Every structure is written in structure tokens, then in C-alpha cells.
Amino acid sequence: MKPPVFDYHDPETVEEALDLLAEHGDEGKLLAGGQSLVPLLNFRLARPENLIDLNRLGSLTGIRREHGSLQIGAMTRQSTMEHSALVAENWPLLTEALSYVAHAQIRNRGTIGGSVAHADPAAELPVAFSALDSRVRVRSARAERTIEISDLFVTHLTTTLEPDELLVGIEVDPVPERTGHAFVEFARRHGDFALGGAAVLLTLDSSGSCERAAIALLGAAPIPVRATDAEQALVGAAIDEKAIAAAADAAIADISPTGDIHGSAEYRRDLCRVMVRRAIAAANRRAKGEPEPESSNGVID
Amino acid sequence: MPRSVGARVLRHEDPRFLTGQGTYVDDVQLPGLLHAAFVRSDHAHATLLGVDAAEARAVPGAHAVITAEELEGEVAPIRALVGTPGYQECDMPALATGKVRFVGEPVALVVADSRYSAEDCAAAVRVGYEPLPVVLEIADALADGAPAIHEEVSDNLYNSFETSTAGIEKAFEDADEVVELELTQQRYGAAPLEGRAAIAHWEAGQLTVWLSSQVPHIARTGLAKFLGLAESSVRVISPDVGGGFGPKCVVYQEEVALAAASRRLGRPVKWTSDRSEDLLTTIHGREQIHRVRAAATAEGRVTAVSVEILASNGAYAPWPFGAGLDSGMASENVCGPYDIQLYERDVKAVATNKAPMGPYRGVGRVMACLTIERVMDELASRLELDRLELRRRNLVESFPYETATGLVFESGDYPRSLELLAEAIGWEQTSAEDEGLGRRGRLRGLGVACAVEHSSYGPQSLGSRKMEMTFGYDSAALRVEPDGTARLALGLHNHGQGHQTTMAQIAADELGIDPAKVEVAYGDTDSAPYGAGTWASRSTVYCGGATVLAAGDVREKMLAIAADMLEASAEDLELGGGRISVRGSRARGVDFEAVARRACHQPDLLPDGIEPGLESTRRYEAPDPGSFSSAMHAAHVEVDPGTGEVTVLDYAVVEDCGTIVNPMIVEGQIQGGVAQGIGGALLEHLVYDERGQLVTTSFIDYLLPTAMEVPAIDIVHLESPSPNTLGGWKGMGEGGAINAPPAIVSAVNDALGRLGIPPASHTPLTPEWVVEQVRAHAPEARMEAR
């Protein structure tokens, strides 16, 4: 369990990193927090010739609000965002999603941008950012561009980033008033990759009907997916048991998750329905300002 | 001074571990050290066509690629010798010879400058295989015309025997109730924090092996034998070991091959298993099928039990225990703590193309406990009796009690244990509260499991297994130094059991000194007395007993010297508080140190006939058939019908291990064991695919319970001293792992029973299994769960 030989680069500026990427992009791999890449290297499942370490790029860290939107530097540690009061107050879906990401030690090293760029469909952050209609900012030695999150993910561990492009940050628009959020997932153990999950944002109008819904599914497909049929089914409706059940059914109508030893495709599909149901109910409760139910095991479930 | 035995003395070893100052095999550095990696079979069953190492030898940093051919004549195959009728032995070559029998089997050994280059080199070795039909399941291995895994092992049966009590047929004819169940248990294993590791150093005709082992002396015996060396030319050093749990008490292929490589190269060679190697190749545990029939009266008294036991022992028989361990021990313990005198068993240890199976905490008895506890629950349900009440009607009540398989429970109070358990978990109140669909549509249930833990086997009891060696004794060498501190060298090993503390407590009480003054040594065959290491909950009884004997010798001598110094009679003296004084008159005494100094440094002042020095080495044989602790567990669980999640809410244990040396350490053993049992009940599973590839080769897929999955455990002690052992001690340490899976199965069955779901008779209980049951039997409950 040792990686094969590679060349190691540790640029001090983004420009240097972009030059290295331009030179080695095809045979290079970017090292952010290393929580996914290092195991892949040690298992020899990834065999890059060049490793470009981003950990000295201080300019890529930090969380701030600009013109109401959240700006997250790609190299911001997950634990930093987890403990950010700004995020907890204004984008609590992200805070809740982070509570499911692996374990504290991993979140201390893992980065926000690394998780998004790694594009693991069982990872929480890409799903939460999808529900929030986020954008990623990308730079290369050639140019700079912004990609809508819905255009970012191609398939399992694959994005639309070009080999010479570096994800430098993530932008999230403000969440409207009267919006409830919920991130729920189920894993064999706390901190494991989820067998299924859902991120939901519900905006209610003054009468309590659904004005806007965002539902993103975790582990349901090779990329984070938005359950658009389910979202549309909710808009304009009062959120009752029947509406929730119908939305959950709609959410899984077109998904076909991949099964493995921890759960078959059929089990996972069914689990997504349960997760969507619970997430909508929780988001609705929160949008209405109702109290949180007690939990037997310390996590929101 | 109060006795130290019985006190919660803080562990002497902990400052070292907690400050990162432990020394494990991988921490050992030697001049000229080379590093090994193994080329392993990626076929479960195949003829070996050849190994091409030409390209590998050219990898930068490579020193050697060693194959079976090159070891021919240098090492003998590992072969566990077992002389009981119905047992069939087989060879386990250090490197695969002729064919491979499981995925992960070592095929070639690569030695290089670093582990990095060793892995590059191993990746460049080309191995030719001709696949053979793969035999994975017990039924396939036993089918007519099944492919033979070993030529020497006919019908793929390592071991096969039957016994039956006369009159059992009549009991079934007369029975009011006959319960029939088939139970299955998955393959799971120990996964110690530190995987296997070894350094072999051949120098000037002497072999030194640093080995992550529970049994340094047994390993020395084995290595000498398989390498054709005198035992006196082999030294095994097992420094700090990061967990054993059973798998580190056998001699592995890698260790023999590594020693041969060092002998060939004249350089020390290190191999530290990575997690994948450990999961692939370190002895697996469990995997049994039991088919049980039990006869009972209308009052719920079980009168007879008949069981067929099948174990999947994998591709080889580990040395020195052989392949009969799990199934044999299961069969001895199926009747648990219950008074069932009519018993028959049909026991088979089956060869399969999986990793070898062998000792793992709770050997065989986890399944024995699941079997009898499921019988008890089933009977309670049929007779509409409370599950505890049904057990009460069957518990052994008078001691000594000889079981149908010849075990002799020497002392205990099983009904009282069960009573204490009911109090600890709040059985009646909790049962009432759990009725119906609970909060947010979750289901709750209570479970119970009772077991007797056989440990510290006597020499005859172990001898009846007809192994190459019998481990029914162990050793202690006690030396009091000139300054009055003591050094206690033992034949045990210490890898989590806290022996550095408990053995010091025992010696300290015998000498009347503070346990902090007793240094405990073990693990180096050059300095520790010959012993069988630590496994099967043996060390407190054996080494504690030997310590009492050795310390007694030293004490008597010190009393004689002190008597001379005090001009008193030795019979009138007592030891305590670091003094030897006239009974009742502490002032009329001498310091322990002064007597030690006199014995070691002032031979001129010693009375006639007293030899200088304070040392004794003694052995202690445990009484046959052994000692028998009891453990009774109760689990309270919550099941989510929506996701299938099982959460263990509360857990209670009543443990009776005789006289307790250190309650804190006993509790640690219970907590760790229960955690492993929760893993076995719900999470841990070594999964093979249909081609015999192990799928769970990392901790992403092999799911150990974490602190999040293990509740706080309420532990109640009952102390029924053993009348047979020195000190009244009984071995303990496995009960946690034995009872927890059946207790949790019982609790989940209780919870799911509220929806009319038939009870499970298997582990692990996965979320998917739970969801399938709910969907099939009570689909509406899934919508209720929030």
C-alpha cells in the first residue's frame, strides 16, 4: 500500500500552480486535502506522474460574503466551514451536510474545493451545492470562467474541468426568506459514505404553500441529481403527508443507483425515497419555524 | 496495607501508550534493514504454472525475488499435527507450491531497499495460473464430486466427529415441544489496530525475529521447526503488540518465508502487513452453520439438544491448533449455562477456498450461544412465557455441575446473575414501554443472551485435543532486586489485557509491597520463562498462579532472613506496607528493602544455609478441565423500519469471573468484547464474491463499530471465586464478544416481532435485511417511520 513513483511540485502562487497544470495537466493530479487522493495513490488506483500540491496557496482559503453571496475559497478546510457562523446562519444546509462528512479528523484536512472537484456521487458537499444552485469559479493559465454546478459533473469522479483548469472557489447565492432546509442521509455507520440521502430547500409563501423547492439526491446516480419532477410537483402545493409522499415517489422515478455489498440498487432506490420524504418534512417544519424533534442518536434523522 | 487485588489500580502500561512511546515491530530499526513485500495469489483456486521474476529483479532497489522453488529444502511446510480420530492434516507451504488455495496466499517474496521499491518489484513479478473450480460455500465443499482443495483431505473435511448421549431419542419422542432451527453466521475477524508485522534477522548462525505475536515462545518453537534450526538458536521478541484477539497466536507463512529470506541475504528484513493484507490473510473467524433440534416439556424445560455443526475453515489449517478449533469448541458449549444432560452433536470442519479460519476471541462459542439462545427465545414464544422466566427454568443451579460434554462448572450463581441483569436493563418496565410502534414510528426491543466461558484449560482438557503440544501450564520468574524492587518475567504476552498491572498487583500482595514496585516483563524468549503466551483468557489463572507460587518462594526466604535480622521466629512475622514485622507490631520490623539488600549484597550476614539472592521460577498447571466464568447480557435496541438502521440504545452485562484482580480492567475487557460483538451482530462481514475474491479489503468496506455505534455499557460484577484455581480467579475476556451478537439478534427480533416479522437466526442483521422484512410483512410501517 505505497504509491508508485511520482514527481512532487509545491507551488507558492496560483499562477505557478496554473503553469504547472498547463505543463503536466494530462499526467498530473492536484493534491488538496488528500483525503480521497492519498488512499487512491496508496492503492495504486491513481498513478499520476506529477503531484501538484495546493496546500501552500493561502489565497485560495477563506469564507466571506460578497454582495449577499457566499464566496468559499477552494482550499478552505471543511472544518472551517463547519464552524463558520456566517454559513450556519445563512446557509445552514451546508453546515448540516458537513455534519455527515466522514469524521472530524478528516474534515480538518479535507477541503471544500477538493470534495467538489473529486465529484464522488456519494459525497455530501456536491449534493448540497447542487441544491443551492451554486457556481464554481475556475482558472487556467489561459482563462478564467464560472461554471454552473449543474454543468460541472459528468459522471463518477469526472467533471467538465479541463486538464489545465483549477477550481479556485465556489459561489452560493443567498437563500430566500421563509426557506427551510434539510440534509439527511443514511450510512451503515456515522461518517461512512451514505447509502442514500437528500438535500432539500423549501421556500413557503405567506399562506404556507410551497413557492420554490430544490431537491438533490445523494448516491442516486453517478452524479448529484436534482429531482426536478418532484420539485415541480411541490410548487404551489400545501406540504402535507400526501404531497410529501407523491414528491418522494417522483424523486426516485428515474433514478437507478449502483448496488454493492452494503445495499442493493433496489434498497438504495427505496432508501432515497425515504430520505426525500424525511428531508421534505424536516425542511417544511423548519420553514414554518416548528421545533426540532428529539433524536435518539444525536444526529438528525 | 490494603490488598491490591480487587482495586482499580491504574494501568502501568498506559503512560507509555498514551504518550506515543510504545514500541511496535514496525518501530524497530536495524542497520542494513531491507523491506519485504509479498506477491499474492489473485486466484482462489488455481494450478501454479510458473513465476517469472526477470523483470522484477531489474526494478531499482530490488535485492531478491524468492519463490517456493528456491525455498525447497530450506524450509519445511507448516503442518498442524492433530491426532484425534476423524481429523485430516494438511501442509501449508511458506510460499504456494503447485497450486494456490485462496486469494491472498503468498506466492513469492520480494526484498528491496524500501517498502516502496518492494511493492514496485512485487507488481513486476508475473505469475501464471490455470484456474481450478472454486469452492466457497460449505454446501459446495461437501457436495458429491466437489473439487478437492487438498489431496490429503478427503471429502474436504479437516475434521469430522459425532457424539451422542444415550437416551436422547426417547427425549425427543416424549417431548411436548420440539424446536428446530437453522442458524448461520458470517465470516468476520479481529482486525487489530496493528496488523501483523515481523523483522527476521539472521546473524552469525542465530535467528532473531521481532514478531507481532501473542505467543513468542510458541512462535519460536514453530520457526525453529519449519526452518530446521535448534530452538536455542532462535530468539523471538514480541514488543508492544497492538491487539491480538487470537489471530496472532499461530505461525504464518510470511514469517517462515521472511526468516528464510534473511538467512539467504544475511540482512535483516522487515515486513509490516498493510490493512488489505491483514484483511485478506490474517486468520478469519466465525462462519458456521448450525442445525439444531431441541426437545422441551410444556413447562419450558429443555430436555435434549441435537446439533449439526458446520464450519468453513478455509484453505489451510493454522499451526499449531489445526482446523478443528471453532467447530469443536462450539460443540462443547452449545448447552450454555443450562442444565441439559441429553446432547448429541455432528461436527464438521470444512475446507473452502477462503482464507484460513482460526482462533478469534470467543472461538466457536459465539455461534454456540446464538444457537441455544435462539432455541430459548423460540420456546418462550411458543409457550408464551417471558424470555427471562424460560431461561430461569433451565439454568444450572448447583455446583459443581458436569455438562453433557464433560465441562465442570465449578461455582457461580446463574439465577442471581439473571436477576441482576433484569434489574440493570430494567427488563419489565422497558418491555412494557416498548409495546407497539414507538416514537416517530421506530420499533424498540429487548434481547438477552447467557453464556459460560470456559478458560484456563487444564492439561488433560487440552491434551484430549491431541495437538502437537499441550498448553495447560504457564510460568513466572520473580526476582527481588537489591533495592527491593521486583522484576516479574512471565510466559504470557500483553497486548491490551493490562497484565503489566494485574500481575504486578498479584505479586505485590504476595510480597506486601506497592504494585508500582513490580516491573513486569514478557515477550522476549531470551529473558522470559517458556510459556504459551496470551489467548483463550488463560493468563490470569496460569501466570497469576505461577506468580503466587514464585512470590511465595521469595516471600518465605525473605521471612527467614528477616527472622534472623529481628531475632524472631519466621512464623511470627508478616509482610505488608513494604515492611516485614512481628505480627501486630509494625515498629518491630525491618524494611522490605533492607531484607533485599541483605539477601543480595550482604551474604556475609545471611544465616547459615540460606543461599544469597531472591529469585524463583515456577510453573502453574490449571486445574482440569478449567475455570468457568459466566456472562449474561441484555441489549435494548431501536429499529428504523424506513432505513433498516438498528441502534443499540442500552446494554447491560452481569459478569462473574470469580475473584476480580482489577475491576477496571475486567470492565475494559467486557466493553471491548461487546464492541466486537456489536460489529459481528450488525456490521462486520468478510465478503467473498463468486470467484473467491475478498471484496472487503479496506476499512471502507469492512465495517468496524466505532464509538458512535457502541453505547455506554452498564456492568454489574458478581464474584463467585473458583474453588479450584489459586486466587479464586477465572479467566475472562471473551464473554463480551460471545454474548453480544445473540443478545442483539434477540433484541432486534423482539422489535420486529411487533410487526409480525419472523425472527432472524443469522448475523449480520443488515439494514437491507430489515427493510426487506418490513416490506414483506408490514409495509405500512415504513410510512409511519419518520
Image: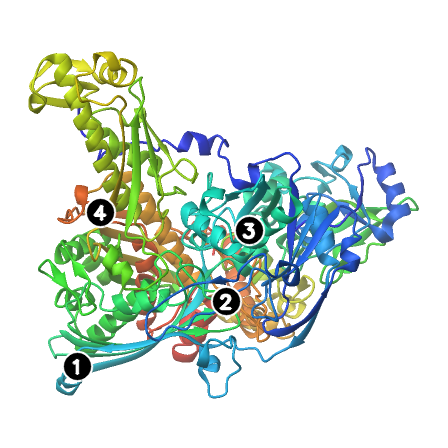
Mark 2 vs mark 4: give the one in front: 2
Q: Give the chain of mark 2.
A: B
Q: CA distance from mark 1 to mark 2?
A: 39 Å
Say which residue label 1 marks.
B168
Amino acid type, callout 3:
Tyr
Q: Residue furthest front?
A: B609
The residue at 21%/12% (across/down) is B605
Mark 4 secondary-structure assignment? strand
Mark 2 vs mark 3: give the one in front: 2
Say which residue label 4 marks.
B716
Say which residue label 2 marks.
B91
Badge 3 and badge 1 both on one subunit: no
Q: Is residue A64 visible?
A: yes
Badge 4 and badge 3 both on one subunit: no
Residue A38 placement (x, y as % from top left) = 68, 48
Which circle marks residue A100 in the picture? 3
The residue at 27%/15% (across/down) is B597
Are circles 4 and 3 on residues that touch, CB within 8 Å? no
Quadrant of image for the C terminus of chain B: bottom left
Residue B41 placement (x, y as % from top left) = 63, 65
